[in-house]
């Protein structure tokens, strides 16, 4: 059972947050694993999280891949297989409605998630900071491609050069793709409202976007089950599951006109 704040003050906070969105010419959204939790995908931290059953150092670093690529591929093949059984939830769909409402040029969705559920829901302007589970790339040549959810085996090889493929995921100790990161910075630095959803906000550089938004005078709205380091920068923190809070927030925005 998710904690949920039904108090009158929570309704007021929701109304104020809708007002912040309404006043914004441009909106940026930063999402994390929490938005996909109600689709049935585990988050990373906390009880039952992915990092409880696996050590980051064993499965999510370039050093881990160099040492034991089979182990790393087993971890990512398990996560790829899980994608076949899940669908976007009402939180993802609410962000699609927000983008439709604002229109082109006024909305950017930045996600740390690699599950592809924002695009599956219908979001169009999506920046994937940490890559995507469906994509692979070669460890030697420039080949990079979408292999969908096809079974890849433990040590998949490149069709072009025969070298080992790796998941197209940003691992710890790796740089974010430069173009995606720059676009995310521009979106956050030029928006008037930043919506931060379902992230523990402690993995950098992504978490630094919250502070960046604040420094460039964006109003910050946070949606999470609990307070996080982002809460210190937030004008409004809406506590509750994003699959419930986001539809209510977008509904409140719509019923307020403009
Ligand atoms: P975390 O697992 O660190 O945090 C998930 C957040 O979602 C927590 O703050 C939860 O309270 C919140 N949450 C859980 N269920 C929720 C729900 N139904 N509604 C709203 N909030 C909910 O995941 P991230 O912050 O995404 O990186 O982690 C950031 C990065 O660390 C990931 O992209 C991944 C990981 O290591 C890489 O693998 C490179």
Image (cartoon, rainbow, N blue to C red):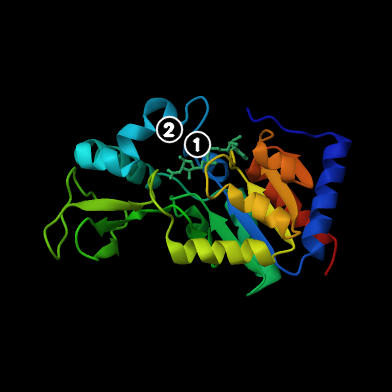
Please indicate whether residue 87 sits to the left or right of residue 18 in the image: left
- Residue at horizontal 52%, vertical 45%? 204
Q: Is residue 210 left or right of residue 13?
A: left
Q: Earlier in the sequence, mark 1 or mark 2?
A: 1
Is residue 144 visible to us here? yes
Q: Is residue 124 above or below residue 51?
A: below
Query: How far across and how far down the image is residue 191, in percent?
Result: 70, 64
Label 1, label 2: how far apart the Cα atoms are: 6 Å
Establish whether ligand 1 lies closer than 8 Å to the Cβ of label 2.
Answer: yes
Quarter containing the C terminus: bottom right
Q: Tell me if residue 17 comes above or below residue 33 in the rendering.
A: below
Q: Quadrant of residue 237?
A: top right
Q: Is mark 1 within 8 Å of ligand 1?
A: yes
Q: Is residue 147 left or right of residue 219?
A: left
Residue at position x 45%, y 55% in the image: 116
Q: Are marks 1 and 2 in contact (CB under 8 Å)?
A: yes
The answer, for residue 98, to whether it is visible in the render is: no
On residue 50, which mark appears? Answer: 2
Query: Which image quarter: residue 63?
Result: top left
Image disc number at residue 43: 1
**Number of other residues with Cα within 10 Å of mark 2, as a class: few under 14, some 14 to 19, many 20 or more:** some
Provide residue 41's location: percent of width, then percent of height. 47, 39
Q: Quadrant of ligand 1?
A: top right
């Amino acid at each position: 059972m998710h904690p949920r704040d039904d108090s009158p003050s929570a309704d007021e906070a929701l109304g104020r947050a809708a007002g912040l969105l309404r006043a914004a010419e441009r909106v940026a959204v930063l999402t994390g694993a929490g938005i996909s939790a109600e689709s049935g995908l585990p988050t990373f931290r906390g009880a039952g999280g992915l990092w409880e059953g696996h050590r980051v150092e064993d499965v999510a670093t370039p050093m881990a891949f160099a040492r034991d690529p089979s182990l790393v591929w087993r971890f990512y093949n398990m996560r790829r297989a899980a994608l076949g059984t899940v669908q976007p939830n009402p939180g993802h769909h609410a962000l699609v409605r927000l983008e439709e409402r604002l229109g082109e040029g006024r909305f950017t969705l930045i996600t740390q998630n690699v599950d592809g559920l924002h695009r599956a829901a219908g979001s169009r302007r999506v920046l994937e900071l940490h890559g995507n589970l469906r994509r692979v790339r070669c460890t030697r040549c420039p080949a990079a491609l979408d292999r969908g959810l096809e079974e890849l085996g433990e040590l998949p090889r490149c069709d072009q050069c025969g070298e080992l493929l790796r998941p197209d995921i940003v691992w710890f100790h790796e740089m974010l793709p430069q173009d995606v990161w720059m676009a995310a910075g521009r979106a956050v630095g030029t928006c008037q409202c930043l919506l931060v959803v379902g992230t523990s906000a402690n993995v950098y550089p992504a978490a630094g976007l919250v502070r960046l938004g604040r420094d460039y005078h964006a109003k910050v709205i946070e949606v999470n089950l609990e307070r996080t380091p982002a809460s210190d920068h937030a004008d409004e923190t809406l506590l509750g599951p994003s699959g419930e809070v986001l539809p209510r927030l977008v509904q409140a925005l719509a019923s307020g006109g403009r």
